[in-house]
Image: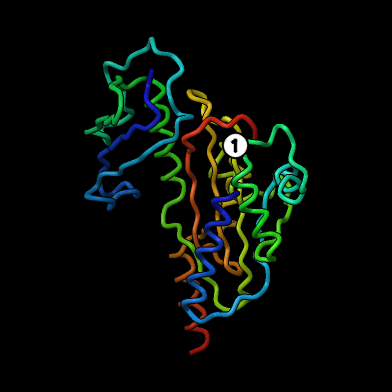
């Protein structure tokens, strides 16, 4: 999660460089409810000592309004395909959701549309 | 015990659909999940299904090991995956909002050999996928 936050901050810097103003909080989606509650909960538990530094880092960003955490059920979690072995159907659905498509097929379609217009 | 990071290179003929990558050689780094659980069955002969895969060699950075049946299965699976999705690409759509969203996930002790977790994230700017990453961690997690 902390790595994800780092990535978000990096992207914000790039957007700033491109002179794009980005005011809204950035979404941080996670399928782990305890993690989200630990990020929001000010009480330190005995078992979460070793995540203290990362937690404080994320908590700081949440408090500043830079990021907003969000819960997603595991079956819709896109990153599962990077971290786990998934059944074929779910894997295909997720690749579609990532926006991975057959480019050459699309080129063909564009050509047809162009021909119709002309 | 096999190492956590190994490399395999397979030579594939150019008409096979997955060629034109680095002079017809695909280099793959696979995850520790593919690693061998049985150390008895060494692969002395490579029962490649066809003569397509003429050259194959294993590189290992930390420890030496012999290729085993499981490695062959892993390689076959990777090639199946590559063959099933040729000519795929990412589409960047124009317009829409610029809402930044990042999906994060980690599997708790996902590696069967050394119980190390894998974390990953992928980042969307609007509806377009911008960056993604998956990394096996260097530490053993005691909690998810």
Residue ID at (50%, 70%) = A13
Residue ID at (49%, 24%) = B114
Q: Residues within 10 Å of mark 1 (few under 14, many from 20)?
A: some
Q: Residue furthest top?
A: B40
Of residues B142 and B47, the one nearer the viewer is: B142
Q: Residue furthest bottom?
A: A118
Q: Position of residue A22 (x, y in %)?
A: 61, 75
- SS category of the residue bearing label 1: strand
Residue ID at (42%, 27%) = B73
**In this figure, what is the number of numbered marks?**
1
> Where B16 falls versus A8 (above or below)?
above
Colour scheme employed for the rendering of this structure:
rainbow
Q: Position of residue A88 (x, y in %)?
A: 58, 41
Q: Position of residue B40 (x, y in %)?
A: 38, 9
Of residues B51 and A45, the one nearer the viewer is: A45
Give the residue at mark 1.
B107
- Give the chain of mark 1: B
In the displayed structure image, the side of residue B123 where residue B49 appears, left or right: left
Quarter assignment of residue B45:
top left
In the displayed structure image, the side of residue A69 where residue B54 appears, left or right: left
> Where B138 falls versus A95 (above or below)?
above
> Where B41 falls versus B21 (above or below)?
above
């Amino acid at each position: 999660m902390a790595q994800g936050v780092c990535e978000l901050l990096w992207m914000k810097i790039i957007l700033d460089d491109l002179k794009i103003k980005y005011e809204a909080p950035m979404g941080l989606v996670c399928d782990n409810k305890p993690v989200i509650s630990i990020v929001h909960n000010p009480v330190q538990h005995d078992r979460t000592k070793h995540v203290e530094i990362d937690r404080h880092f994320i908590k700081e960003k949440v408090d500043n309004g830079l990021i907003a955490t969000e819960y997603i059920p595991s079956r819709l979690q896109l990153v599962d395909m990077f971290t786990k072995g998934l059944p074929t159907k779910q894997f295909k659905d997720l690749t579609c959701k990532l926006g991975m498509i057959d480019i050459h097929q699309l080129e063909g379609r564009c050509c047809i549309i162009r021909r119709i217009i002309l | 015990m096999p190492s956590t990071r190994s490399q395999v290179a397979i030579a594939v003929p150019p008409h096979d659909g997955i060629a034109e990558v680095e002079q017809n050689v695909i280099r793959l780094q696979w995850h520790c999940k593919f690693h061998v659980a049985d150390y008895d069955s060494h692969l002395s002969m490579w029962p490649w299904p066809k003569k397509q895969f003429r050259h194959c060699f294993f590189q290992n950075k930390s420890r030496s090991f012999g290729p085993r049946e499981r490695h062959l299965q892993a390689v076959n699976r990777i090639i199946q995956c590559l063959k099933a999705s040729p000519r795929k690409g990412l589409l960047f759509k124009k317009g829409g909002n610029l809402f930044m969203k990042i999906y994060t996930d980690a599997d708790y002790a996902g590696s069967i050999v050394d119980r190390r977790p894998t974390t990953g994230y992928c980042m969307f700017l609007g509806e377009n996928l911008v960056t993604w990453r998956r990394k096996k961690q260097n530490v053993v997690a005691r909690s998810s």
